[in-house]
Image (spheres, coloured by chain):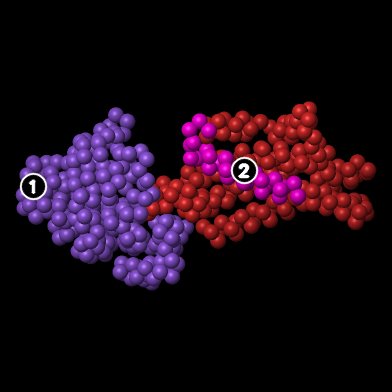
Amino acid sequence: MAMIEFKNVDKYYGKYHALTDINLQVQQGEVVVVIGPSGSGKSTLIRTINGLEEIESGQLIVNGMDLADKKADLNELRKNVGMVFQHFNLYANKTVIENIMLAPRLVLKRDEAENKKIALRLLDTVGLAEKADAYPKQLSGGQKQRVAIARSLAMKPKVLLFDEPTSALDPEMIDDVLNVMKSIAKQGDMTLVVVTHEMGFAREVADRVIFFDQGQVVEDDPAEEFFKQPKEERARQFLSKIITHK
Amino acid sequence: MALLEQAYSFVNMRFLFEGLAVTLEVSVISIIFSFIFGLIFGVIRYIEVPYFSAVVGFIIDIIRNLPLLLIIFFTYFAIPELGIRMTPMSASIVALVVFESMMLAEVVRSGIQAVDSGQMEGARANGLTYFQAMRYIILPQALTKMIPPLVSQFISLIKDTSLATIIVLPELLYHAQIVYSQNTTYMLPMYVMIALMYFVVCYILSLAARYLERRLG
């Protein structure tokens, strides 16, 4: 069974048709990159996967739970589906280590010593062990994003969603964050859905690329094929635009 | 000089301090209760429970737009008509709590709204329930932001206790009036002294707030 499955999903903001008849499957362990022009609905798409956005019709099954069902237990879902945001959303009133330890403590009831050990190890993995007691406002954007990734990983999710994780970063910060993301992708056990404009990242680690425009899946290809030659004209134009600008 | 010595005699000063003690007692009790109720009503206003929050909002609007003195008269003179008798002390506290908690509810609501919405999203996506997110992430940040308006409301409350002099609550202003009604030449020294007392109490509170804000901010 697929880890994430969209069946004829529609979403509206008032009269605005944000997602139109989405049909998609993401298998467990797959790395899927979603690209497309801004305003195309990529963020809305990814935010439906952990229930931050509701869908109006169709079926959306994530980790065996149907999110179209109003009674779906989103807290239960989010134990298994983490998310990294464009603007980090670190807890401003908590230190770095507390940012990472809070949800495992409250939600998973993880043993305190174990919790701390895991948090410190994750901080070390993202290269920020020395920032454990800093507050988010004392960190650079790139550091914040790496802490945010560590915070998500601490929940040991099956699915990790990235919503434009490098779009708010200064160029020199982007590589550190992408390197962390690449190493997660290469471990291969976690299902990743990444909305990004970083084509280098997509080329290197994506299994599939989805080109999204005007609330629709325009193209859904294995990554290699996509970068060789997208089938759709709109995707070709978009790709040539962002690549020539690099 | 002799006048001042007589006006500020030990007995008179002791009497003023007794008044100050009542003022502080009423203030502290009212601040505690109006903060608790203000927090509850403010959160209800913020989370927008269907119908309920609208009703609460309507009540808040009514009370905020009434003079406090009217509410004091109402609790002391009108409510006993319904068979509930109150001392000046309890009537003052009830009136102050009713009025100030509604003022504080608006402070609380706007404080919560001032917290970046990404904080709630981050917490929910991280697996926290709505209440956990409120308790550990949103409210602590909102409270820090609220310190200045909260304290200025507390200061208003302390000053407003003087209105209760009208229902013969033996607070600071009332005691000053008693002293100078014995000897009207004491009027000016009494007003200066109680002004100083109100100022010292309120100024200490605002200094404490500034310190707290710097430490938490």
> Looking at the picture, which amino acid does disc 1 mark?
Pro
Question: Measuring 33% from the left and 44% from the top, which residue is drawn there?
Answer: A51
- Of B18 and A85, the residue lying toward us: A85
The tag on residue B37 is 2
The image position of residue B12, as x and y in percent, is: 89, 51
Q: Which residue is mark 1?
A: A230
How far apart are labels 2 and 1 at the CA level?
A: 61 Å
> Does residue A105 appear in the picture of this structure?
yes
Structural crowding at the residue carrying mark 1, measured as other residues with C-alpha within 10 Å and reported as few (<14), some (14–19) or many (≥20): many
Asked if the stretch drawn in magenta spans residue A219, the answer is no
The image position of residue B165, as x and y in percent, is: 80, 39
Q: Secondary structure at mark 2?
A: helix
Q: Identify the image quadrant of residue B83.
A: top right
Question: Measuring 87% from the left and 53% from the top, which residue is drawn there?
Answer: B13
Question: Measuring 81% from the left and 41% from the top, which residue is drawn there?
Answer: B169
> Looking at the picture, which amino acid does disc 2 mark?
Phe
The image position of residue A87, as x and y in percent, is: 34, 52
Q: Which residues, given as a range, are shown in magenta?
A: B25-52
Q: Is residue B185 left or right of residue B196?
A: right
The tag on residue A170 is none
- Of A131 and B87, the residue lying toward us: B87
Q: Which chain is purple?
A: A
Q: Identify the image quadrant of residue B42.
A: top right
Asked if the stretch drawn in magenta spans residue B27, the answer is yes
Residue B128 higher or lower than A99, as above or below: above
- Of B91 and A160, the residue lying toward us: A160
Q: Is residue B133 left or right of residue B42?
A: left
Chain B in the picture: what colour?
A: red
Question: Measuring 27% from the left and 48% from the top, which residue is drawn there?
Answer: A64
